[in-house]
Structure formats: structure tokens, C-alpha cells
Amino acid sequence: MKKPHPGCGSNKMKVLRCGADFKLSCAGCGHSFMIPRSKCEKKIKSVIRENINSEG
């Protein structure tokens, strides 16, 4: 995110659910919250993807 989380100062969030709105979880303190898609898309600085090795 462009601005850090006010509770802990971390600017990394994990996406738990996406749709009309996003459910995000702070990577620093674990606080989860929901935000509308339009606001979330404006606040995203960059996307970091996890490498998931799926076999099969």
C-alpha cells in the first residue's frame, strides 16, 4: 500500500478475499479489514506474489 498501516507501520497487506470489495490482512500485526475495490486499487503501490508450487 502507499501509506503504512496506522496500527503497526507495515505497508504490506495480504489479500484474503477479492470481489466487489477486498478483505485484507496486515502482514505486520494481523489486523483484517474490508475495503471497497475502487479505493483499494487506488491505494496499491505494487503487487508481490507468493510462489506456489502446485503439482498435479
Image (cartoon, helix red, strand yellow):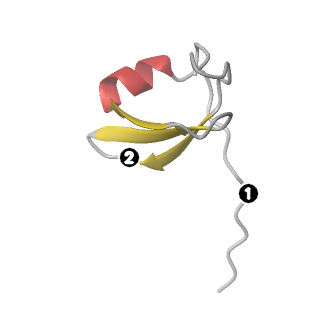
**In front: label 2 or label 1:** 2
The image quadrant of residue 47 is top right
Dot 1 amino acid type: Asn
Question: Circle 1 sits in a helix, a strand or a loop, which is it?
Answer: loop
Q: Which residue is mark 1?
A: 51
- Residue at coordinates 67% horizontally, 39% vertically from top-left? 48
- Residue at coordinates 68% horizontally, 24% vertically from top-left? 10
User: Residue 42's spot in the image, x, y percent?
Assistant: 43, 18
Residues at marks 2 and 1, CA–CA distance in whole angstroms = 19 Å
Position of the N terminus by quadrant: top right
- Residue at coordinates 38% horizontally, 39% vertically from top-left? 22
Q: Which mark is residue 12?
A: none
Does residue 29 appear to the left or right of 43 in the view shown? right
Dot 2 amino acid type: Cys
User: Residue 53's spot in the image, x, y percent?
Assistant: 73, 70
User: Residue 9's spot in the image, x, y percent?
Assistant: 67, 18
Above or below for 17 versus 30: below
- Residue at coordinates 31% horizontally, 46% vertically from top-left? 19
Nearer to the camera, 1 or 29: 29
Q: How many marks?
A: 2
Q: Which mark is residue 18?
A: 2
Above or below for 12 versus 3: below
Question: Circle 2 sits in a helix, a strand or a loop, which is it?
Answer: loop
Among the two numbered marks 2 and 1 on one chain, the one whose residue lies closer to the N terminus: 2
User: Residue 4's spot in the image, x, y percent?
Assistant: 62, 16
Position of the C terminus by quadrant: bottom right
